[in-house]
Image (cartoon, rainbow, N blue to C red):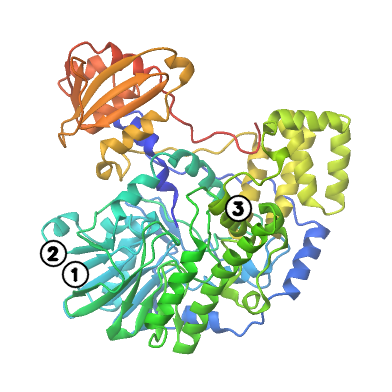
Amino acid sequence: MPILSRITAFAALAALAGQMPVRAQAPVPSLLAHDATPATRAVLAAAAKDLPPEDGQDFDFASRGFIATWPDSVIRQDNGKPSFDLAGNDFIEGPAPGTVHPALWRQNRVMRAEGLFRLAPGLYQVRNIDNSNVSFIETPRGWIVIDPLTVAEVARAAFDLLKKHVADKPVLALVYTHSHTDHFAGAPGIVDPADVAAGKVQVIAPKGFVEEVVSEWMIAGTAMGRRAFYQFGYFLPRGPRGHAGMGMGTAIAAGRQGFIPPTLEIERTGQSVTVDGVELVFQMTPGAEAPTEFNLWIPSLKALCSAETATSTLHNVQTLRGAKVRDAKAWGDYLTETLRMWGGEADVLFASHHWPRFGNAVIRTHLGHQRDAYKFIHDQSVRRMNMGQTPTEIAEGLELPPALRADWSVRGFYGTVSHNAKAVYDRYMGWYDGVPANLNPYPPVERARRLVASLGGARALHRQAQKAFAAGDYRWSAELAHNGVFADPADRTARLLLADSYEQLGYQSESAIWRNIYLTGARELRQGKPDSVAESGPNYLMAATPLRHFLDLVETTLVPERAGTAKLAFNLVETGSGERFAITVENAVMVSEAGQSVPGAPTLSAPKPILLGILFGQAPLDAMVASGRARLEGDGAAIRQLSGMLQPPRLDFNIVEP
């Protein structure tokens, strides 16, 4: 599950020239929130009657083996600011209020258990001091660490708990199960990169790990980041009318992140590695929950790590922050393979999120239900697609069969059947649903203006939206009010109706990320502007990102109207790596060719940060050359001209209004 840190390519560029402040989350004021309406309370009361029976097993598994938790209510950064507030989930107490779906409330109650746990002799896990889990395998001389959390502060706290209460031994190996930030960026809190460089610590990851980490934070990173603020409810106050978890965890830790590249990449299923006498066996699962990922079997412990291929929720086939569509069919097939390889032996199952499971029969059932959920969504979406249904029609009518709906672990606390079904359609068919009216519709603002006019104007729309809201039809009141806002952002009546509609839809959502998206939309409508966050730099991934990836990103920022008919050519040399690039602009298209030069064109040589700062006008070319930080051969006019053609994207673009 990727987190916000992957989004900051442009913030990193700005920081290179010393233009960005230290990263700090903006204050989170508590905007006035309404209570649940009678209609929402009725929806949630009906949902409560349709929940699976409570057998207490998840609560037992979540608390089993508890050793200790962090002694203070807050884990702090070096500057004294909170990294993670362990008391932030304390409001989850007693029966669900009328503003939180009862199933989501129950999910958060299970995750109240936080701290260090013993899963088996020699196997430990620290949970719920971050969005994700970190696990530890004891060897005779040290520790193998699996997925060292999101930031160094909580990773260090987890390791301190382990050393204090179990054994103070060195880390011998780090294992990254997949390429999402909350499973590797806390590594510097546990391991010194110098020890990795000296060969004292092995770092193990799936094949293609670095490439996938780098590529996903680059080209679409800003757009993903803006939408991630919505998905994760980044600015919502925690509480029964605000942030109530994220389905996968309770909250994201803040602090220092780093990147320690792997020293060994696993390439095939069945490949094994022995660390200090402990064998690890890997199953490759690329294209399921992450572009590169593996499950992990520990034969001596009969313990299976399912990473994020099988957790305690239905996951995303396409995450709502934006990402490449995942392969639901492959996901199900991988879990079939997992069952065949180790399903008959596993006594302990643990994952990168949520709580473990114990006992072979329980584990087989869990893996089977997880497999069946992804395969059912895939197969039935394709069946309906081939019967001519559109994505919206498929999503509206599709639900899991009774046996799966009765399993808490495949409830839609994170992913949902609805948006996963649409993702399956998108993977095979793309954006077009086959309906001619949807082939070339008016863009949102023009469509909204025409719709409002056809209804008889804004007041008529208000009456219809208010009628729908009063009837508890919040999907329709949101649809109408949304068009009112897009037709006229100054229409206060439409804005407040839309905010109120989103709020009730958020309260009704079983999915934490649907809830966060709706409530963040309501928040921004009421405050009249997007929230923002300052970023420090350089970004922790920057050193690991080749210049060619940054140039791919630069190419996407060229503004055609600024480029006009200009023809430009120059060369770049990145002095750190020696890489050379030929840069040309023609027909409002920028092309960068690695390993090439344009004969007779000017050449700019500098370290990667300086080159990028110059291109974006954040480090003046002449000043960099005069200071000796860059070397220019020839006339720099083309470089200055290109800099004026570029438009870095914004992390605060509008979503709930034009």
Q: Give the label on residue 119, or none.
A: none
In the rendered structure, which amino acid carries the disc numbered 2?
Lys
Up the image or down, 25 lies above or below 653; here it is below
Q: Residue 215: x, y in percent? A: 36, 45
- Contact? badges 1 and 2 (CB < 8 Å): yes
Q: Residue 627: x, y in percent? A: 17, 19
Q: Could you give the CA–CA distance between mark 1 and mark 2, rounded to whole angstroms?
A: 9 Å
Q: Residue 471: x, y in percent? A: 87, 53
Residue linked to disc 3: 516
Q: Quadrant of residue 479?
A: top right
- Mark 3 and mark 2 lie on one chain; the one further toward the N terminus is 2
Q: Dividing the image into 4 quarters, which one contains the C terminus?
A: top right
The residue lying at 52 percent from left, 43 percent from top is 27
Left-right relation of 354 to 613:
right
Query: Which element carries disc 1, helix, strand or loop?
Result: loop
Residue linked to disc 1: 170
The residue lying at 29 percent from left, 41 percent from top is 542
The residue lying at 37 percent from left, 78 percent from top is 304
Query: Which element carries disc 3, helix, strand or loop?
Result: helix
Q: Could you give the CA–CA distance between mark 1 and mark 3, rounded to whole angstroms?
A: 40 Å
Q: Quadrant of residue 132?
A: bottom left
In the rendered structure, which amino acid carries the disc numbered 3?
Asn
In the rendered structure, which amino acid carries the disc numbered 1?
Pro
Task: Answer yes or no: is residue 19 visible.
Answer: yes
Q: Dividing the image into 4 quarters, which one contains the N terminus?
A: bottom left
Residue linked to disc 2: 200
How many numbered marks have been drawn onto this rendered protein structure? 3
Query: Which element carries disc 2, helix, strand or loop?
Result: loop
Q: Residue 198: x, y in percent? A: 10, 58
Q: Residue furthest left?
A: 198
